[in-house]
Amino acid sequence: MTLAGEAREAVREHPFLLEALRAGVVNYTAAARYLDVGEEEAVATALRRFEADLPGRDPDGRTVTVTMESGLGRGEGGVPDGSGEAPLLSVGEAGLVPGEGDLTGVLATGDVDPVALARVLDRLLAAEVAVEAAGTVADALLVVVPRRAGADAVRVVEDALAGVPDR
């Protein structure tokens, strides 16, 4: 494999660096030193070329609506205490359903996908908002946070989704 190929492979193993290249905010020499795949100047040059080959970003291409629902609670089999409420999120035998729980669901509908979920989770982590559960399917994305973090989570989710490039 060529040095350029090794550098690209190394970048793909570090998604934060790939995102930084796409954003054009990389110190190439420092990145080359971090990757440690060959002679620093040659790797820095390979990174510059890789950045030029990356697809452009269009962060305005998604249409998403964000809402919040408080009072989510955990239930077995997706339905707690026979309430009949449909779960907003379920995995295996556990589910999160509306009711009298202490969690808040932030639901984004529209043009969402796992890439959008990854961006949302990264941003919530950076904002120090604890995430209890998360998932996406079809045109819906849900993150579940403690009740008191709900309003902050809505702001973070809206902001994060505004910056996710169109598919």
Image (tube, rainbow, N blue to C red):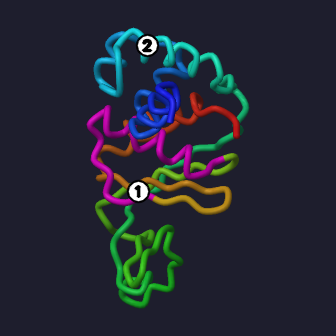
Out of 54 and 57, give the one closest to the viewer: 54
Residue 82 locus on image (x, y percent): 42, 90
Residue 46 locus on image (x, y percent): 51, 18
At 41% across and 70% down in the image, what residue appears? 96
Magenta stretch, residue numbers:
112-134
Out of 48 and 105, give the one closest to the viewer: 48
| Residue 155 visible (yes or no) | no
| Residue 106 visible (yes or no) | yes
Element assignment for label 1? strand
Q: Amino acid at mark 1?
A: Ser
Q: Are marks 2 and 1 in contact (CB under 8 Å)?
A: no
C-alpha separation, residue under disc 2 versus residue under disc 1: 53 Å
Image-based side of 59 in relation to 35, left or right: right
Badge 2 crowding class, 10 Å Cα cut-off, few under 14, some 14 to 19, many 20 or more, is some
At 34% across and 52% down in the image, what residue appears? 145
Q: Is residue 41 above or below residue 166?
A: above
Q: Which residue is mark 1?
A: 70
Q: Which residue is mark 2?
A: 42
Q: Which quadrant does the C terminus fall into?
A: top right
Q: Amino acid at mark 2?
A: Ala
- Extreme residue toward the bottom, this view: 82
Out of 86 and 42, give the one closest to the viewer: 42
- The numbered mark, 2 or 1, whose residue comes first in the sequence reads 2
